[in-house]
Image: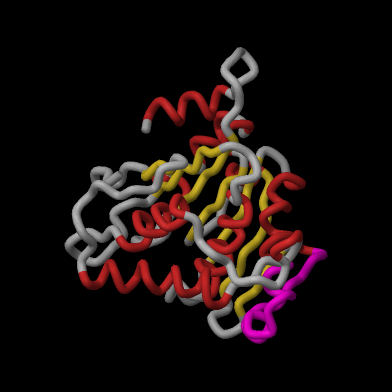
């Protein structure tokens, strides 16, 4: 569903778009990222290993709103995406694909893209999936170097990179973030959850920040950050 400028776009299991049609430029940008997912990426494990990445309706909705919904000046309308779905719905795989696209094919030279979570091991889940996608694709392997010792993927032509951070890294100085992918936002400390929002996480005009979490049964164990963030959007 369309949101006002600078407000997050939230995905649920339904993906129908009730907003206005995309502009021609927005449609082209949306179709470009869809082409990357469905024609370039390959699943790296499980029964679908080696098969093309067929986007589900909710994934189309997320990509359409994040990449295709533009302001009048051509910049992206949505700077934050929040994905909340049950487990085993492809959230981490989707973020891995976004990590590669935003790092290498978003038109940003020297882009700094980061993956974060409540701890570095959790953040490494998206990295490992993205690294496996690169290794599974001869085409992607020509563009990217994977450095496991640093949990970093480098796009050689643009000198851009995707790197894993722990949540407390947002307190460090000197991060010039092009895009941030925050895994299991609901379990993040409050300060880190605030860092995932656009005022702190994105300094360029176009990049999105995408947080995802898993739906859990209602009760006192639901993480505070997830409840607060869900309530705002």
Identify the magenta region. Answer: 132-149
Which residue occupies the extreme right position in the image? 149
Q: Please provide percent x and percent y for residue 233.
A: 37, 33
Whether residue 7 sits left or right of residue 178 in the image: it is left
Q: Nearer the viewer, residue 135 or 196?
A: 135
Confirm whether the magenta stretch covers residue 137: yes
Whether residue 46 sits left or right of residue 57 in the image: it is right
Q: Is residue 159 above or below residue 66?
A: below
Q: Residue at x 33, y 48 (%)?
A: 16
Q: Please provide percent x and percent y for residue 203.
A: 41, 56
What secondary structure prevails in the magenta region? helix
Q: Please provide percent x and percent y for residue 121.
A: 76, 46
Figure coloring: secondary structure
Q: Residue at x 48, y 61 (%)?
A: 178
Quarter of the figure with residue 7: top left
Q: Residue at x 56, y 56 (%)?
A: 94
Q: Residue at x 69, y 64 (%)?
A: 48
Q: Is residue 174 above or below residue 187?
A: below
Q: Nearer the viewer, residue 38 or 114?
A: 38
> Is residue 129 visible in this depiction of the protein?
yes
> Is residue 131 visible in this depiction of the protein?
no
Confirm whether the magenta stretch covers residue 66: no
The number of numbered badges drawn on the structure is: 0
Quadrant where the N terminus is found in the figure: top left
Q: Please provide percent x and percent y for residue 30.
A: 36, 67
Q: Is residue 160 above or below residue 112?
A: below
Which residue occupies the extreme front position in the image? 47
């Amino acid at each position: 569903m369309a949101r006002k400028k600078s407000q997050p776009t939230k995905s649920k299991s339904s993906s129908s778009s009730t907003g206005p049609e995309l502009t021609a430029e927005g449609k082209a940008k949306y179709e470009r990222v869809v082409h990357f997912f469905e024609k370039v990426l390959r699943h790296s494990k499980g029964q679908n290993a080696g098969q093309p990445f067929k986007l589900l309706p909710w994934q189309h909705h997320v990509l359409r709103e994040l990449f295709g919904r533009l302001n009048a000046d051509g910049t992206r309308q949505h700077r934050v995406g929040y994905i909340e779905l049950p487990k085993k719905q492809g959230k981490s795989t989707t973020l891995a694909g976004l990590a590669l696209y935003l790092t290498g094919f978003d038109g940003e030279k020297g882009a700094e893209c980061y993956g974060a979570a409540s701890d570095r091991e959790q953040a490494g889940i998206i990295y490992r999936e993205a690294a496996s996608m690169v290794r599974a694709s001869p085409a992607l392997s020509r563009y990217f170097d994977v450095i496991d010792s640093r949990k970093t993927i480098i796009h050689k032509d643009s000198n851009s990179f995707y790197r894993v951070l722990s949540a407390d890294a947002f307190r460090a100085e000197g991060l010039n973030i092009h895009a941030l992918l925050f895994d299991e936002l609901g379990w993040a400390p409050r300060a880190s959850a605030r860092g995932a929002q656009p005022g702190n996480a994105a300094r360029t005009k176009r990049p999105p920040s995408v947080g995802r979490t898993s739906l859990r049964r209602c009760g006192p164990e639901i993480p505070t950050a997830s409840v607060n963030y869900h309530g705002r959007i």
